[in-house]
Image (cartoon, rainbow, N blue to C red):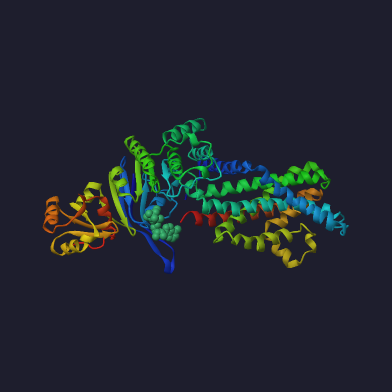
Amino acid sequence: MVEAKNLVKIFGKGASVFRALDDVNFQVRVGECFGLLGPNGAGKSTFIGMTYGSVKKTSGQVTVFGLDPQSESRSIKKRLGVVTQENALDESLTVLENMMLYSAFMGVPRDQRRRRIEDLLEYMNIAHKRDALIQTLSGGMKRRLVFVRALLGQPELLILDEPTTGLDPAVRHLLWGKVKELRSSGTTIILTTHYMHEAEVLCDRLAILNKGKIVAEGSPQKMISDHSPGYVGIFKSEDGAKVRSLVKETTTHVHEDSSGVYLRVPTLEKMTSLVADHSLNPAQIRPSNLEDVFLQLTGQELSVDA
Amino acid sequence: MRNISFDSIFEFARLCVHISRRNWTVYKKDLIANISPTVADPALVMISLGLGLGAFITNVEGKTYMEFLAPGLTVATALFTSFFESSYGFYVRMTFENVFKAMLTTPIGVSEVVAGELVWVGLKGAFMAIGVAIVLAVCGLMTNPWLIPLIGTVGFLVALPCGAMGLISTALVNNMNQFQSVYSFVIAPLYFLSGIFFPIDQMNQYVRIVAEFFPLIHGVRLAQAIFWERAIVDTYVASGSVLVIQSFIFCTLSFFLIRKKLVT
Ligand SMILES: Nc1ncnc2c1ncn2[C@@H]1O[C@H](COP(=O)(O)OP(=O)(O)OP(=O)(O)O)[C@@H](O)[C@H]1O
Ligand SMILES: [Mg+2]
């Protein structure tokens, strides 16, 4: 459905060139929810802009529905819904006016516009705000409205660029529910997010982008077992020195942040015996998750491998 | 390149209309505030210059100073209404509200954004010029009020390239303050040096030659011809065709510059 082959994007000229995407290859299959993860500035939004022709590629190939976004963007955009990273709602218009305008842009037949908008506002629980000005909406309401806007054209492909950033847990769960429903009704979805849990909950497959390069790809489970198998113990900083010395004697991984020192070992037995042998005091022991993979692969883990 | 077919032209026109309609929806929300400066400014000029200064100037090309000023004011209205909308107005929507980022995810492309904007400012310029002309005609400053609809064509032909100049400056400025320089060095000189306030022929040669490259002076010639019923057809052929050519050049240039801003 979406395919990138040796895709390169270079911003700027001369001395200030910047490779935002550097030889990127991947495929999004029909009907799946594909997650694109990566730290700030990794190139996620740049890739998304390329799928509908707002960002021009430097070299390589990208196709959406088998079409080239640079020459056939209009045909692509008719079948696409995008939740942009910025809400970009028209502040001078009311909720309803905004949606009427966009349904006209999407070519929704005139006699169906109002119905479709009302249904979607209802679906996203913001029907009561239909006549409000955009400025008077909360962040969560604006985000839900952007979802409505993206769904007006009944898209085959829905692209979500950090759809839940800055939202409270209730709104986030509401949106997750909607994304799952859309996916089970056959919509293909591309999602970028900084919440690893969100990616684990929603995505069938993921790619991690770091500094413009894909550093891992696969299902969340496969990524964890490939790159960060085992269990993670989180220790208070008092145990820090002890834990760090363990790295030298065992094949474990360690990283550290303000919440404590993280130690990863391949099995739970290994973890419990380490804890017992060195009389450590773990705050938590848990199976390793996508966040561990992410930190490791994007080079934000402090020290790796003994 | 996109295939040019009947369907795609129809789709293009449909999308442009929706963009223009969006601007109309916003505009009519604050109708009084939006219309009043475009009517108040010419009224102010009429009172201060026409009545005040006019007391000392009794004969300009055989007319009172009031009569002389009148046609140019319709053109000035078209200039200001279009330039401000497509400079400050467009800049805010592009930079602060990111409106076009979202629009460009729909079948709207940069060509529709630019064309929709220009059609809107053109129409607005036409209606504003007509509005001002009606007031002036009521004051007895137009020899034949039946020609007022023609002033609409002048308003359109001036507003279109001036709106494109607004878009061009939007694409070139680095921040909103710099519009002030555009105003001081381009728009205000055009306003004062395009034959609205004194006869074009008596202007400094070099200044006039520079002014010929911009739309205002041609609009003024056309409006004067209509107001004074003087060689209307000939002036349409001469000045009208220049305006059409300038519109084409400025609009095309604005499209390429805005595209650079919206597609990276
Ligand atoms: N128009 C541009 N000109 C120059 N550089 C740009 C432009 N747009 C993006 N970049 C650069 O490209 C890089 C990738 O940006 P992008 O917005 O794709 O990152 P992202 O993965 O979406 O990050 P975030 O998670 O913060 O949204 C950044 O370093 C950014 O500064
Ligand atoms: Mg981004």
Q: Is residue B236 visible?
A: no
The number of discs equals: 0
The percent coordinates of residue A2 (x first, y second) are 34, 46
Q: From the viewer's perspective, is A134 left or right of B242? A: left
In this view, the residue in front, B223 or A117, is A117
Q: From the viewer's perspective, is A226 left or right of B123? A: left
Q: Residue at x 86, y 54 (%)?
A: B64
Q: Is residue A173 visible?
A: yes
Q: Is residue B12 above or below residue B58?
A: above
Q: Residue at x 17, y 51 (%)?
A: A230
In this view, the residue in front, B43 or A198, is A198
Q: Residue at x 42, y 45 (%)?
A: A83
The percent coordinates of residue B54 (x first, y second) are 85, 56
The percent coordinates of residue A256 (x first, y second) are 26, 60
Picture quadrant of residue B175:
bottom right
Instruction: Name the image quarter holding the N terminus of chain A.
Output: top left
Q: From the viewer's perspective, is B59 left or right of B136? A: right
Instruction: Name the image quarter holding the C terminus of chain A.
Output: bottom left
Q: Is residue B231 above or below residue A154?
A: below
Q: Is residue B30 above or below residue A238?
A: above
Q: From the viewer's perspective, is A102 left or right of A40? A: right
Picture quadrant of residue A216:
bottom left
In this view, the residue in front, B208 or A51, is A51
The percent coordinates of residue A234 (x first, y second) are 22, 54
